[in-house]
Image (cartoon, rainbow, N blue to C red):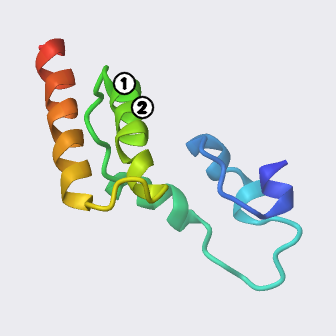
Amino acid sequence: MIISSGEDVPANLEVQKSDAFLKPAWMKTQVDMRVFAESSEFVFRAPFIPEWNEMQAAIESGLADFWLGKERSAKKALTALQKNLESLIKSAG
């Protein structure tokens, strides 16, 4: 479905190597679609952080008041957020 719609690149590298992806029926001009699979070698993959979900929630809640205009100081919001994130990391270690 992703290939036939032409709206995105399939995440599966094997699918990216298929003729259906490399030469889709909708393509009117020759385009080298191999670059998508080849570029995966250069993608930065951040190390896995088990606490990521907790950190994401802390970021969202820590910045909510700032984005909603309740907290006017970005520095104050970010300082508090930094302390919260550091405590999450320290408690995990």
Give percent across and percent down for residue 61.
41, 37
At x 42% / y 48%, what residue is drawn? 65
Answer left or right for 9 relative to 78: right
Give percent across and percent down for residue 82.
17, 41
Q: Amino acid at mark 2?
A: Ala
Q: Amino acid at mark 1?
A: Glu
Dot 1 falls on a residue whose secondary structure is helix
Give neighbour class at mark 1: few <14, some 14-19, many 20+ (Cα, 10 Å).
Answer: few
Give neighbour class at mark 2: few <14, some 14-19, many 20+ (Cα, 10 Å).
Answer: few
At x 31% / y 22%, what residue is drawn? 51
CB within 8 Å, label 2 to label 1? yes
Q: Which mark is residue 54?
A: 1
Q: Which residue, given by chain and number where applicable, does mark 2 sit on?
A: 57
The residue closer to the viewer here, 29 or 80, is 80
Dot 2 falls on a residue whose secondary structure is helix
Give percent across and percent down for residue 35.
51, 67
* Picture layout, residue 80 above or below residue 58: below
